[in-house]
Amino acid sequence: MRLMLVLVGIILVAVNAHASTYREDRVLSLEVTRIQELHISCGAGALVVQGQDREDIEIKAEIVVEGVSEEKTRDFVQENVELSLKKKGRTAYLISKTDSSFWGSEKAEVNLVVFIPRELSVNIKDGSGSIEARHIKGHVAIQDGSGSIALDHISGDLSIDDGSGDIMAEDIEGDVTIKDGSGSISTKKIGGNLSIVDGSGSIDVHTIGGSVVVDDGSGSINITGVEKNVTIESAGSGSCNISGVKGDLFMRD
């Protein structure tokens, strides 16, 4: 048995000696004539969506692969990485996926920087990795497995359904709806109503133009500067500090 373990160790060292980190950059683009919304479906990797004054969608993608020998890397990417940008009707679809059934120490991810016209709405379905989105005039909807989320300067409504990871939303003109499993939530300068359903993690709410509804499992709650009503459906466990509410305060616990 000891001899077998030694041999396995030697084999693993030999494999790792020939493995390296592979990086490949790709650029995708699409004209946005009559397109109103961008759907993004992505797996592992960071995602940044940036609204700009432009008339096309441009994707800058970085493919990163670890644990694959150099001579096999290109075949590995071709077989296990999907990256595409297509148009169907009034919607553009960006797909970025990596095969999760790798054996051993193989790991692949695709980091994306997405430049879009400000007027587009964005729908994101993400597996893991951080998400940033800013300067978007349309609506933004996010369904996320894990990873931090940071959003600012969104003119439309915002909805987030998140498994885990910190959430920051600032300078949102529309209504904001957040459903979160775990991780801190920080919101500031929300023009419309704010609704939060949270499993665990601190909640900080500041400067809200509409009403606020919070249903919390555990973690502190801090709310200041609300133009309309505040309703705490459940405060869970943790401190609850509320001030500067111009409307009514309802505590349903």
Image: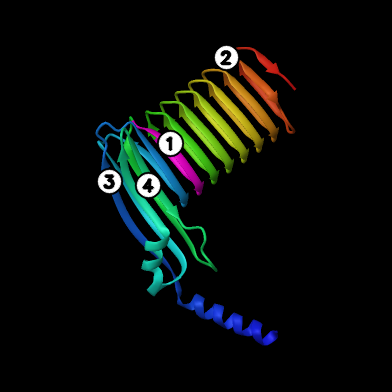
Are dots 2 and 3 in contact, CB under 8 Å?
no
Q: Which residue is identified by label 1? A: 123
Instruction: Say left or right for 253 vs 124.
Output: right
Q: What residue type is disc 3 on?
A: Ser
Q: What range of the chain is rendered magenta?
A: 120-134
The answer to if 68 sits in the magenta stretch is no
Relative depth, front residue between 145 and 209: 145
Which callout, 1 or 2, points at the residue further toward the start of the chain? 1
Q: Secondary structure at mark 4?
A: strand
Q: Earlier in the sequence, mark 2 or mark 4?
A: 4
The label shown at residue 50 is none
Percent x, y of residue 162: 56, 39
- Badge 4 is on which residue? 113
Give the foreground label among 1 and 4. 1
Mark carried by residue 228: 2
- The secondary structure that most of the magenta stretch takes on is strand
Marks 4 & 3, CB-CB < 8 Å contact: no
Residue at the spot of label 3: 29
Residue at 44% x, 63% y is 65
In percent of width and height, residue 32 lies at: 27, 36
